[in-house]
Image: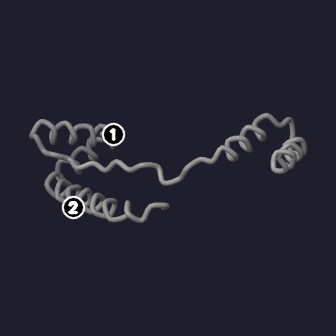
Amino acid sequence: MTNIQMLAPLIVGFSLQEITSNSMLSEFEELVTDSYRKGMSEEKIASGLYNLWRHRGTKIPTLVSSPVYEEPEKAKEYVSIWFRAKDIQSGRDEHKRCKVR
């Protein structure tokens, strides 16, 4: 992580999400258990719960974070070299030439 100031909002956001998730799970545990027993997929169960919560007007907190890693241009160039290489040796040779530039 390159920006320490992002840490506090992340911790608060994850905590709120965990608290909300736990309270919702305890409220709907029986429904989820029955759905599993009936063979419903996790995706269908999650979708059904989400629709139920939305219908009830339950606010579901979400957390959106920015990427913490940047992809340097040099890395893109290295990946391109290896994808174009006919074999390992030609990839190594081109990579060495690229590093010298």
Q: Is residue 96 above or below residue 8?
A: above
Mark found first going from the N terminus, 2 or 1: 2
Which residue in the protein does label 2 denote?
A: 19
**Residue 3 in the image: x percent, y percent?**
44, 61
**Residue 30 in the image: x percent, y percent?**
17, 52
CB atoms of marks 2 and 1 within 8 Å: no
Which SS class for mark 2?
A: helix
Which residue is at a point 27% across and 41% down the rendered structure image?
45
Farthest front residue in view:
101
Query: Residue 4 vs residue 11: left or right?
Result: right
User: Label 2 neighbourhood size at 10 Å, few (<14), some (14-19), many (20+)?
Assistant: few
Which residue in the protein does label 1 denote?
A: 43
Between residue 77 and residue 52, name the one nearer to us. Answer: 77
Q: Tell me the quarter of the picture where residue 94 sits.
A: top right
Query: Residue 17 vs residue 64: left or right?
Result: left
Residue type for callout 2: Ile
